[in-house]
Amino acid sequence: MKLGLGLYRDRLNKDNYQFAKQAGCTHIVAHLVDYYNGVEGLPSTDKDRNMGIARPNEDVWSYESLMALKKSMNDEGLEFEAIENFSPADWYDILMDGPKKTEQMDNLKRIVCNVGKAGIPIIGYNFSIAGVWGHVNRAVARGGAVTATFNLAEGPEETPIPNGQIWNMTYDFNAPKGYIPAISSEELWQRLDYFLKELVPVAEEAGVRLAAHPDDPPMSTIRGYGRLVNQPRLYQKLLDIVPSRSNALEFCLGTLQEMTEGNIYETIDQYSKQNAVGYVHFRNVKGKVPNYQEVFVDEGDIDMIQALRIFKKNNFDGVFIPDHTPQMTCKAPWHAGMAYALGYMKAALAIVNNE
């Protein structure tokens, strides 16, 4: 089992690669989607992902760009483990069952082939219209650390999504006024069925695993739009659509713990036993929907050592990343929070790997 760090696009640079290496990481999970571009004054902090601009067919997805990015990581002694999320501009009509879905699927197939050719083993994705929504940063983690919280009764109003937006990002500024029609979970499952049956065979041939993130927050609907995997058992439904090593899971422990059904340790056992886990978001929480808080890795409801032992028992040998974490009170709150999480994770992995 290996230690990695997830980096947003604005953090994919030598300084942060060196930070990752110094913290004991061997692998990087990269976001190529620029969540903050063109949004003046929007801070680049975890969970502040609202109202970015989604630009289609960016050069970052080309084989040449992927190889250059991989080389920049390799030069610092790190491996490029995964890319997290397609750009909304490249697949909004796949999510919406719109007129450009065939054209956009052809483009996703090219992206997957480029990723495979570059030797990057995993693409994580979140098949969702509302995306990650409703979190509010509050100083409620240990010692008053600022962290993401979700409280349905006190959070933002669940307004419908305007036309031209998806996943909290704008892809069409000329879209007609109005809102995306509400859809049920059943309709979203039908769209996922198309996505997987079209793309998994291409991923198999390219040697890439497509890894699905569960719904965050794991509500049955958000802003009037149905969700997919808001309970642990629904991950199995996703896997069964196209049984394949290339149809895998981006296994977020925090999100799975937030769900109202199931047991986190049984969930880890069920899916790691199937070799269905691509990589792991190793983070902890207190509470469940509709009211929970993201907390430091060692203060939440999950016994993280017990979780690691289950992964090891089932011979999982993939990468664990902090994903995100409370920010510590200092001049570099993100780096400090990540350093704390990575230090805990490195020690925990050493204990369990050597047992």
Image (cartoon, rainbow, N blue to C red):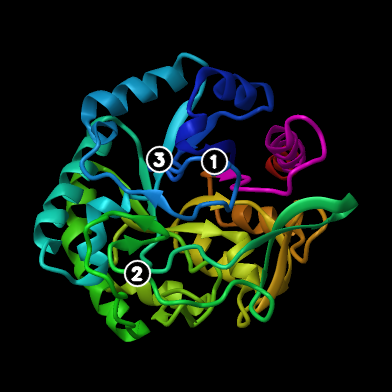
Q: Is residue 290 left or right of residue 298?
A: left
Amino acid type, label 1: Gly
Separation of marks 2 and 3 at Cα, in angstroms: 19 Å
In the rendered structure, which disc, 2 or 3, sits on the residue that comes first in sequence? 3
Amino acid type, label 3: Gly
Separation of marks 1 and 2 at Cα, in angstroms: 22 Å
Task: State yes or no: residue 251 in magenta.
Answer: no
Residue 134 visible, this orientation: yes
Q: Is residue 230 left or right of residue 304?
A: left
Disc 2 + disc 3, Cβ < 8 Å: no
| Residue with the mark numbered 2 | 162
Badge number at residue 41: 1
Question: Which segment did they paint magenta?
Answer: 320-348
Residue that appears at 72% across and 45% down? 352
- The residue nearer to you, when weighing 106 against 278, is 106
Separation of marks 1 and 3 at Cα, in angstroms: 9 Å
